[in-house]
Amino acid sequence: MKRSFLTILCLLCFISLFAQKTTVVECDSIYKNKGISIKIKNFEAESEGYDGEKNSILIINQKLNGKNSVLVKDSIFSLVQKIEFQDFNNDKIKDILAQNISDVRSNWTYNLYLYHPKTNSFSKVIGFNEIKNPSYNSKYNLIESHVNSGTNWAAFYKIKNNKVHNYHIEITDDGSAKSEKEYQRALKKITEKK
């Protein structure tokens, strides 16, 4: 009796450890009357997510008039399967961010899917998952990365043809007057390049 109970308990623990986790997000509040939903289905046990590992399938689906259409199907790594919505191409329509990894200092990375309202489609931005803590600066049409580390720093990027362009400018980001001057110099240098 004890042996059977322990066997069943071990089996249940094993099954729950390797069970697939699925996250579904209905997007009606973001993409009104489009019938768009997002599903992330985890297919592996948790791992670190480095070196190109994939552990999930991301599906952006559209259901209109009883018809289902898959708009995007992508193999990704997503540690916590978090979905966020932010505008990253200055069209005033939110794009989809699917969480990728978080490092030891809680610097998060994401996969980015830009929404194109004219064609009702999404495109993945290649290399975006390399940017830590991305935020969009709409005034300069730039992506900023503010990284927490031994010395906090910031870097600057732009999306060109669905790929990330790195300006290779890094500055100290400690909130001091000196780092604010570095930030303003970096923005000036980037805008002069345009």
Image: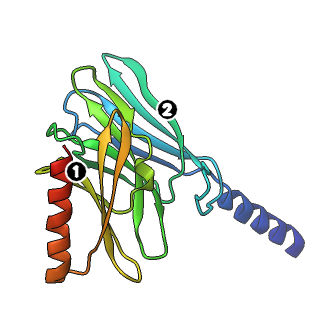
Image label count = 2
Coordinates of residue 164 in the picture (x, y in percent): 37, 45
Residue depth check, mark 1 versus mark 2: number of the one nearer the observer: 1
CA gap, disc 1 to disc 2?
Answer: 27 Å
**Is the image coloured rainbow, by chain, by secondary structure, or in one colour?**
rainbow
* Residue positioned 86% across, 75% down in the render: 2
Tag 1: amino acid: Leu
Residue assigned mark 1: 142
Name the secondary structure under disc 1: strand
The one nearer the camera, 98 or 155, is 155
* Residue positioned 17% across, 41% down in the render: 90
Q: Which mark is residue 73?
A: 2
Instruction: Using the image, determine if residue 172 lies above or below residue 53.
Output: below
The one nearer the camera, 119 or 27, is 119
Coordinates of residue 82 in the picture (x, y in percent): 40, 55
The one nearer the camera, 143 or 68, is 143
The one nearer the camera, 161 or 20, is 161
* Residue positioned 51% across, 36% down in the render: 74
* Residue positioned 67% across, 61% down in the render: 17
Image quadrant where residue 181 sits: bottom left
